[in-house]
Amino acid sequence: MLTLSIQAQPAIDTAANAAVDTAAAAAAVPVEPAAAAAADAAADAVSVASLSFWDLCMQGGVLMIPIAILLLLSIYFFIERWIVIRKANRQDDTFMRRIKDYIHEGEIESALNLCKNSGTPYARLISKGISRIGRPMNDVLVAIENTGNIEIAKLSKGLPWLATTASGAPMLGFLGTVIGMVQAFYNISAQGSSADIATFSGGIYTALVTTIAGLIVGVVALFAYNILVAKINDVMTSLETKTMQFMDLLNEPA
């Protein structure tokens, strides 16, 4: 009996090893497709994550060009007007006091030269009033107000463009989205039953790019417009203050 059991042991070991190999082979069969699927999913995730802002802009189509031009022009007008308005609102605390001294001393030419050298909107305002000294006070005031309107119009140059861009850029982006949606539905219709969700969703996100771009440009232009309007209002307040000071100066006894 001992001999039989010893001889049977190699057969048992062989059968056990064969069973283990079979199980390992069976388990390895579904692993490879699962690993491949996981690798494909990871690759897709990487490709989606690597979609840059520039890639989105390129997907927007030809209407992204005018939207980009509107953005650049809005930035240019904002910076240029900001510099001009900031210079216009430059204050000289001694200006009105010196004007008052020159007028009381009868040095009209010196007062006019001071205004000319200052080069600010309120200096040109006062210069116009000085040139009308001797005429009725109402004529002096009207001349100053007309000059003030001209100065404000100069400072407001470019603001209508920003206002138009603030409202027009989103509409232009929406137009691009509508065109993109029409193209997407046309492609789906052309593919017929072979169209899948990837085709539909890809057309939608591409079409929405122009709406996003238009809204961004519109928001930038709107903020730029409101900031510049606030700065111009500050200049208007300064002009009104200088006008009242000058009119009070003319009413003072010599």
Image (cartoon, rainbow, N blue to C red):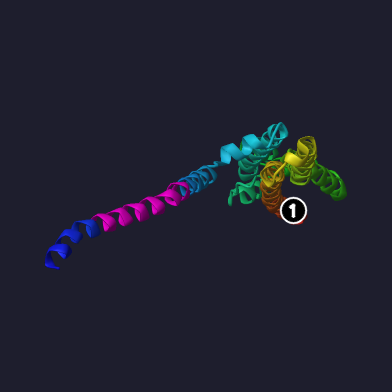
| Residue 53 percent across, percent down from the top left | 57, 41
Q: Which residues are magenta?
A: 14-35
**Amino acid of disc 1:** Glu
Observer-nearest of 247 and 106: 247
| Residue 132 percent across, percent down from the top left | 80, 41
Q: Is residue 185 magenta?
A: no
Q: Is residue 131 above or below residue 220?
A: above
Q: Residue furthest left?
A: 2
Asked if residue 163 shows in the view, the reply is yes
Q: Main secondary structure of the magenta part?
A: helix
Q: Is residue 31 magenta?
A: yes
Q: Residue furthest front?
A: 1
Question: In this image, 93 relative to 112: left or right?
Answer: left
Where residue 105 sits, quadrant-wise, is top right
Observer-nearest of 136 and 168: 168
Secondary structure, mark 1, is helix
| Residue 64 percent across, percent down from the top left | 69, 35
Q: Residue at x 47, y 47 (%)?
A: 33
Q: Residue at x 69, y 32 (%)?
A: 65
Residue matched to label 1: 240
Question: In this image, 231 relative to 47: left or right?
Answer: right
Q: Residue furthest bottom?
A: 1
| Residue 15 percent across, percent down from the top left | 28, 56
**Label 1 CA crowd tier, 10 Å (few <14, some 14–19, many 20+):** some
Q: How many marks?
A: 1
Observer-nearest of 32 and 80: 32
Observer-nearest of 241 and 226: 226
Asked if residue 76 shows in the view, the reply is no
Question: In this image, 100 relative to 93: left or right?
Answer: right
Q: Is residue 154 above or below residue 138?
A: above
Q: Residue at x 63, y 39 (%)?
A: 75
Quadrant showing the N terminus: bottom left
